Amino acid sequence: MTEPTRVKADLVPYTPDYSNLVRSWLDSPETYSQVCRGRTDFPPSEDVVDTWQRDGVVSYLLLVNRQPVAYGELWERPTEMAVEITHLMVDQFKRSQGYGTRLLQLLYDRAAERKGVHKVILFLTGHNEEALGCYVKAGFELVGTTQAVAGLKMVRYVGLNR
């Protein structure tokens, strides 16, 4: 697997022009369920990515050679003094090449720059060893399970492991 620090990529704001492309990365019922926290209504609706865009959410694309290869979002969690990274996905033809880890590192950096943020959280839903490895490589630690989301809760504290 490619080392994430060697992956050259740019994080840019998402625009609706990429909605269909990002939706195409939800390429199986399993991927859809993992990205969308247990949803089973595969295939997703045509506007599924558009429905994720709302106040308190900032969405990004990871570009390699000016081509999108991954998508992720930062959700504000002010009561927890946190930001949650969610809806992470990588183009099915680019998986296991370090892009997911690079995306997580860049999203963490963006979240950690925000005033009042003490931790960045994410959840692992379903059984996905590749995603778990990606999260650990990006510096996240398993802290347990949660009742809010069926799965594992992972955290990376701001100011540590940077």
Image: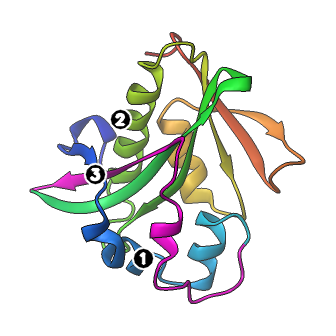
Depth order, front residue of 86/9 = 86
Residue 136 picture location, percent across and down: 56, 38
Residue appearing at x 57%, y 74% in the figure = 31
Q: Is residue 1 visible?
A: no
Residue 39 picture location, percent across and down: 71, 75
Image disc number at residue 62: 3
Label 3 near label 2: C-beta < 8 Å?
A: yes
Query: Which element carries disc 1, helix, strand or loop?
Result: helix
Q: Which quadrant, please, contains the C terminus?
A: top left
- Is 68 left or right of 48, judged from the image as shown? left
Q: Quadrant of residue 84?
A: top right
Q: How crowded is mark 2: few (under 14 residues within 10 Å), some or many (20 or more)?
A: some
Residue 50 picture location, percent across and down: 45, 68
Residue 118 picture location, percent across and down: 60, 15
The residue under label 1 is 23
Q: Earlier in the sequence, mark 2 or mark 3?
A: 3
Depth order, front residue of 129/43 = 43
Image disc number at residue 106: 2
Q: Which of marks 3 and 1 is in front?
A: 1
